[in-house]
Amino acid sequence: PQCPLRCMREILVPYPALRVLCSALYRSYYTPFCGVNDHDNDWFSTVYGEVTEVLPPDAAEPLDKPVRISTFEDADTLITGRAVTGVLHFLNGTPVDWYSKRQDTVETATYGSEFIAARIATDQIIDLRTTLRYLGVPLAGPAHMFGDNQSVITSLSIPHSSLSKRHNALSYHRVREAIAGKVIRFFYVPGKDNPADILSKHCGYAQMWAHLKPLLFWRGDTNECPDTKHHASAERVEI
């Protein structure tokens, strides 16, 4: 529907009043949840349908204790304008994979850079979940993804939230579909407690030691971490 709406906007250039109405209709294409009630849990299905995670048909039978995937993502804008995406993956509190790379595009605000980082982290989580299933590792529910940009988390997690920048639409719907399919859950973590800063920011050892310490010196059994705390502290990473 995007192309007919765009053509209609060009046709209605001599008619300002009608062009305004067409522009409002064009914006609503990217805001499918406008006016939705927060208490209705089925509203994701009104746009994405009955989304379910695709399970590999030839995966091994899951055995032993289940694991929880926790992912921290961050994006930090450099002088050139192209942000660096940092993603850190944990299995029951143990770091198993990381990603640090400069983004391909220049964003005008951190909002867009964080959207791209969330989409990259979502794709990697889906790949990691598939890999674990082929290895016969049981998964403990959806993966927990943490970010330090409250605006991005609100846009992606709350059903009726709208998208203010249309060029982020692909990343927007990619992450929201994963949330609708209960593949991931997106939570906010303060920037000072986000260990993904190690992969996205240029800081000294003294500033990063608070993030490195719980990764190198974990206290206790990583399989017995409580699920009630969804943030990382300076002493340990809770999942």
Image (spheres, rainbow, N blue to C red):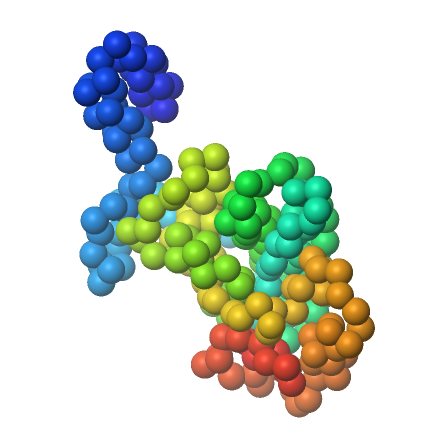
What number of labels is visible?
Answer: 0
Point out residue 26 in the picture as x, y percentages from the top left corner.
31, 28
Foreground pick, 214 / 144: 214
Point out residue 70 in the picture as x, y percentages from the top left corner.
58, 67
Residue at figure coordinates x 60%, y 64% from the top left: 72
Residue 139 is left or right of residue 152, and the answer is: right
Point out residue 139 in the picture as x, y percentages from the top left corner.
54, 67
Residue 210 is left or right of residue 231, and the answer is: right
Residue at figure coordinates x 42%, y 49% from the top left: 176
Q: Quadrant of residue 87?
A: bottom right
Residue at figure coordinates x 61%, y 58% from the top left: 74
Is residue 182 visible in the rendered structure shown here? yes
Residue 164 is left or right of residue 14, and the answer is: right
- Quarter of the figure that contains the C terminus: bottom right
Q: Is residue 52 depicted above or below 68 in this figure?
A: above
Foreground pick, 3 / 9: 9
Q: Is residue 32 depicted above or below 197 in this figure?
A: above
Residue at figure coordinates x 50%, y 59% from the top left: 149
Residue 179 is left or right of residue 218, and the answer is: left
Foreground pick, 104 / 111: 111
Q: Residue furthest bottom?
A: 220
Q: Is residue 133 depicted above or below 4 in this figure?
A: below
- Quarter of the figure that contains the N terminus: top left
